[in-house]
Image: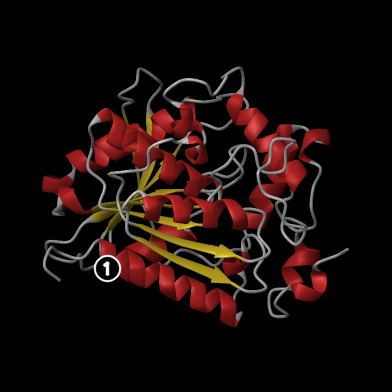
Amino acid sequence: MTTRPLVDKQIAPLLDMFPPVDLASAPIAELREQAGRAYAIMPPPAILPEEIVIPSVHGGPDITVYLYRPAEAKPGGGAILHIHGGGMVMGSAKQIQTSPAMLAVAASVAVASVEYRLAPEHPFPAPQEDCHSALVWLAGQAGALGFDAGRIVVAGESAGGGLAAALAIMARDLGGPAIAGQLLTYPMLDHRTGSDACPYANPTTGEFIWTRASNRFGWRALQGDYAAADDRRGWFSPSLTDDLANLPPAYIATGSLDLFFDENLDYARRLTAAGVPVELHSYAGAIHAFNAVPGAAIAERCNAGLMAAAAAMTAPSGE
């Protein structure tokens, strides 16, 4: 069965532009080059970032962040740490500038996008440690940049959304820095999805863009030789977290045909059961990366919701 008739007609062109790729059969450098060409067609960023090199707090190499500063920052507002997507193995903060720039303009706050290390060269916990280091750095810039360190939001798409969710758990477990909200766009949360251990059996998800085979490749690359059997397993795969209490409020946007649909809904349900405020939006007929299609009504609705959530989460206390 093909789910193509279920795909929203305005985003259907995405299917032919980006057919599924067998990630396991191509050299990783070639995959990244192909991904780079895809990112190059995205609209130019509304504002250009400043490139800053920061130290790791985990003993790793220095990390590059791209800092987006709106022309008029919201007085007393927060800031956003953006984490790019790419299945844990592709993409870069330097290439993917549209999303963090949009967030900076929409929320009128500073946005830092982190250039975390990629798997398989740098498996768990390297990407997570880089993101945590960027969060520590950003929190320390509150005075210099003029934002409220208690209003920092973590945001990301796909793998970046999964890393943002993992970072919220990691920051809670390590005692900070404080996070005010999670803005998760079709986040990659469960390393079991698409494998023999997958707890979901949805026949209408994952046919396009990011497939079960792609997911197995990405998670294997990130996992390396990590057994996912210690207290850090939720940092690796957020769906493995036993205790989701005391995490920041979450806004989750997903698509009904996205491979991550079921894990996103399950994570939202478990957050809610743990007493975490959750706003969940599922878009009918939406495949992975659907909100990147210019002019599609469903993409515009999704992006408008994300930008509004970013503005609300970073608003000054009392607003």
Residue type at tag 1? Ala
Residue at x-position 69% and y-position 80%: 10
Dot 1 crowding, Cα within 10 Å, few <14, some 14–19, many 20+: some
> What residue is pinned by disc 1?
312
Residue placed at 38% from the left, 37% from the top?
243
* Residue 228 picture location, percent across and down: 54, 24
Residue at the extreme front of the image, as rendered: 273
Does residue 105 show up?
A: no
- Is residue 74 left or right of 13 when viewed as pictured? left
Front-most of residues 161 and 23: 161
Q: Is residue 146 left or right of residue 70?
A: left
Residue 296, percent from left and from top? 61, 79
Picture layout, residue 41 above or below residue 84:
below
Residue 235 vs 231, above or below: the answer is below
The residue nearer to you, when weighing 58 against 173, is 173
Q: Find residue 234 and report its image quarter.
A: top left
Identified at 71% across, 37% down, the residue is 216
The relative height of residue 129 versus residue 252 in the rendered view (above or below) is above
107 versus 190 height, above or below: below
| Residue 269 in the image, given as x and y percentages of width and height | 46, 55
Quarter of the rendering occupied by the N terminus: bottom right
Looking at the rendered image, the quarter that the C terminus falls into is bottom left
- The quarter holding residue 195 reads top right
Label 1 SS: helix
Residue 104 in sight? yes
Furthest-right residue in view?
1
Residue 67 spot, x, y in % from top left: 33, 50
